[in-house]
Image (cartoon, rainbow, N blue to C red):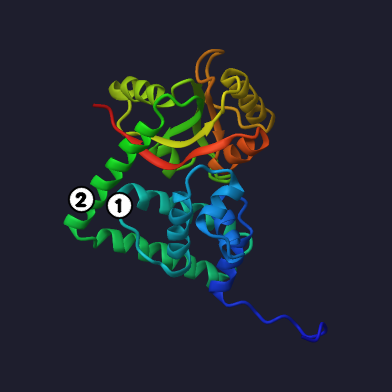
Amino acid sequence: MDPLEPEAELVPRQEIEQLLESDEGRIGDVYRLTKDGLSPQEIADRLNVASYAFVYNNRRHIDAVLDGRGVVGPVFRRQTMGVFSSLILRGRAVLSGEAMKLLLANRAAVEAAGADEDPVTEATAASEEEREAASTLTSLDGVSGIYAFSYGWYLESPVDPSRGNTLIKVGQSVNVAQRIREHTSKARAHMPEPLTLIRVYSTDGRDVGKLEHGFHELLRTAGHNNPRRTGREVGVEWFLTNEDFLDAIASTLGLRTLYTGRSEFAAD
């Protein structure tokens, strides 16, 4: 191509592809590494994630974003809507009007597909999500690590939408599953919706308390403090942050990701 010739104008879908290409989070990682020809297992290995299931989940998000392809299951659909919200926020500064129109149309198509979903199919998908959540918790029994969770209204309506940040609790335990069960039980009386597990990072025999301290220090240094904290001991483990930033910290600290997603746990 003649370097003096003007570059061909991108069509709206290509603009959205570029938006995905520039994303610094997991969906961007999966998009770029898939384009590079890596298999799901190779992508998981490259990103130091224990299971490659997140690759398929992110590919489903990508299909929804690029083509408006519907997704099944209430929890996964909410997660997909969260992906749209994040990309729309970023896209306002870089997408053309036509590209933004396409992105919004694809979001509307995914929402419409969910509204039209066959009740039996939807109920089956919801049951499968519950089984997967239970399996996740079982797999984390006896695991020492750093965990992060939040609640649906924080994830669906970020506290700081301009930066895509919301309130997320970051804690540690020598038995992550047991600790999540305790949090779920304590939330029974005052939380109207399920606890949503976002991340679990393995500490692999290292001092989990020191690693949590390092995690918190990096969050505070980046200005991700909880603005709603009212006392020295209240809300100390809650931060105004996002999943991608948590992954960046985990990578900096050399932690392996054991769980990535949004499993919901309701109190019994």
Q: Where 243 sits versus 181, above or below?
A: below
Residue 187 in sight here: yes
Expressed as whole percent of the image width and height from the top left, the position of residue 84 reads 47, 56
Q: Which amino acid does label 2 sit on?
A: Ala
- The secondary structure type at the circle numbered 2 is helix
Q: Are marks 1 and 2 in contact (CB under 8 Å)?
A: no
Left or right of 90 in this view: 191 = left
In this figure, which residue is indicated by the disc labeled 1? 73
Expressed as whole percent of the image width and height from the top left, the position of residue 33 reads 59, 59
Q: Where 181 sits versus 201, above or below?
A: above
CA separation in Å, label 1 and label 2: 8 Å
Q: 253 or 123: nearer the eye?
A: 253
Quadrant in the rendering for residue 18 = bottom right
Left or right of 267 in this view: 120 = left
Q: 203 or 72: nearer the eye?
A: 203
Indicate the quadrant containing the N terminus: top left, top right, bottom left or bottom right.
bottom right
Expressed as whole percent of the image width and height from the top left, the position of residue 132 reads 32, 42
Quadrant in the rendering for residue 195 = top left
Left or right of 45 in this view: 130 = left
* Pointer 1 local density, CA inside 10 Å: few below 14, some 14–19, many at least 20: some
Expressed as whole percent of the image width and height from the top left, the position of residue 49 reads 54, 43
Q: What residue is drawn where x is 47% and y is 59%?
A: 59
* Pointer 2 local density, CA inside 10 Å: few below 14, some 14–19, many at least 20: some
Q: What residue type is labelled 1?
A: Gly
Residue 89 in sight here: no
- The secondary structure type at the circle numbered 1 is loop
Q: Where 96 sits versus 45, above or below?
A: below
In this figure, which residue is indicated by the disc labeled 2? 123
Q: What residue is drawn where x is 63% and y is 36%?
A: 249
Q: 175 or 64: nearer the eye?
A: 175
